[in-house]
Image: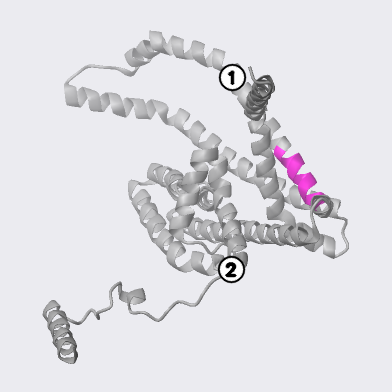
Amino acid sequence: MPGWLPRAMVMALALYGCFQLGSWAFDQLIGLLTNILIAFFLALAIEPAVSRMAGRGMRRGLATFVVFLGVLIAGAGFVVLLGSMLAGQIVDMVEDFPQYLDSVINWVNETFRTDLSRVEVQDSLLHSDWLQRYVQNSATGVLDVSTTVLGGLFRLLTIFLFSFYFAADGPRLRRALCSVLPPARQAEVLRAWEIAVDKTGGYLYSRGLMALISGAAHYVLLVILGVPYAPALAVWVGLVSQFIPTIGTYLAGALPMLIAFTVDPWYALWMLGFVVVYQQFENYVLQPKLTSRTVDIHPAVAFGSVVAGTALMGAVGALIAIPAIATLQAFLGAYVKRYAVTDDPRMHSGHRWSRGESVLTRIRRAITSRREHDREG
């Protein structure tokens, strides 16, 4: 046996063991790494506001705390508004449930010529086996729901803590990162960081402005139609339609249409028409003007990035996909060399002949040029 073979076998086993250990560690830490990635993008988003406040003399840690306090107050206000709306709707549905049940029973009796009563239906429902099993499963699932809620709160706290440290210690973090790189690489890292801050912050602020405009427009319509909970519904439409990619528009419009339907079915149709018209106005007029200097990427690229981000990281990937792609596009645009495009008709029409020429004219021109070539030859 060659002398190098045992050493090679030991080296291969060691590499395999390191690979397995790294895979196990990555699987265990994937949740933490995802939280850190979200916190990093959140810190990039609030970096302009923190830097502006720190430039006016405020301590950077205090400026970061003020910005986060504003975000928390806005988020708590949104949850309270939405919670009050849902609680009011649930109470109304519970109070009106006997009337709904009577109307359904009357329709069944008239349609199928039966003789049902509300008391019989209620007794059959209360003593049914599936309802008892549902109550038992719900009772055993309370612990699972509580665990999920506590886990979500802990994850949210982790994201806020990491993003607070990233934003408050941004200059120190950049100095620590650049201290291990040569001067040429330091300039590239700082430029990439600056581009990421501009694109992520610009994406957040442009989306926030569009959410404000969308919420105000839908609030006016809801007030005109007399739909209840107009402020909460307007906040819902503005935030969900702008910060949930691809399907956010449909989710945002579904809830106001449902509430409007309880008032008058025609109001739901008016709401649907307004949502469709406003979406076209936003896509072709409002969004190009607000995002042309922040996240100017092609719609197909944006859609593809959202799909890819969702496939890789779920909802988190969908949220950070567009600012990440915009940052990458801006970084490549700053370093990729571009050349002047040649003045060729094929750049415009796809072929070298003009569109006005017929096929017979092209054939005649080709035959004439061929004959002239033969005569010269």
User: In the image, 166: left or right of 126?
Assistant: right
Three-letter amino acid code of the residue under disc 2: Arg
Q: Secondary structure at mark 2?
A: loop
Q: Name the residue: 25% across, 79% down.
A: 353
Precedes in sequence: disc 1 or disc 2:
1
Is 117 placed above or below 56 here? Answer: above
Residue placed most toward the observer, 298 or 82: 298
- Relative to 278, residue 61 above or below: above
List the residue tagged with mark 1: 144
Q: Give the image location of residue 276, x and y in percent.
A: 38, 57
Q: Residues within 10 Å of mark 2 (few under 14, many from 20)?
A: few
Q: Amino acid at mark 1?
A: Asp
Quarter of image, res 335: bottom right
Q: Are marks 1 and 2 in contact (CB under 8 Å)?
A: no
Q: Is residue 313 visible?
A: yes
| Extent of the magenta region | 159-170
Tell me if residue 167 is in the magenta stretch.
yes
Residue 278 versus residue 64: which sits nearer the camera?
64
The image quarter in which residue 93 lies: top left
**Residue located at (26% from left, 26% from top):** 106
Dominant secondary structure (helix, strand or loop) of the stretch shown in magenta: helix
Q: Which mark is residue 328?
A: none
Q: Is residue 208 visible?
A: no
Give the residue pinned by disc 2. Answer: 293
On screen, residue 165 above or below 322: above
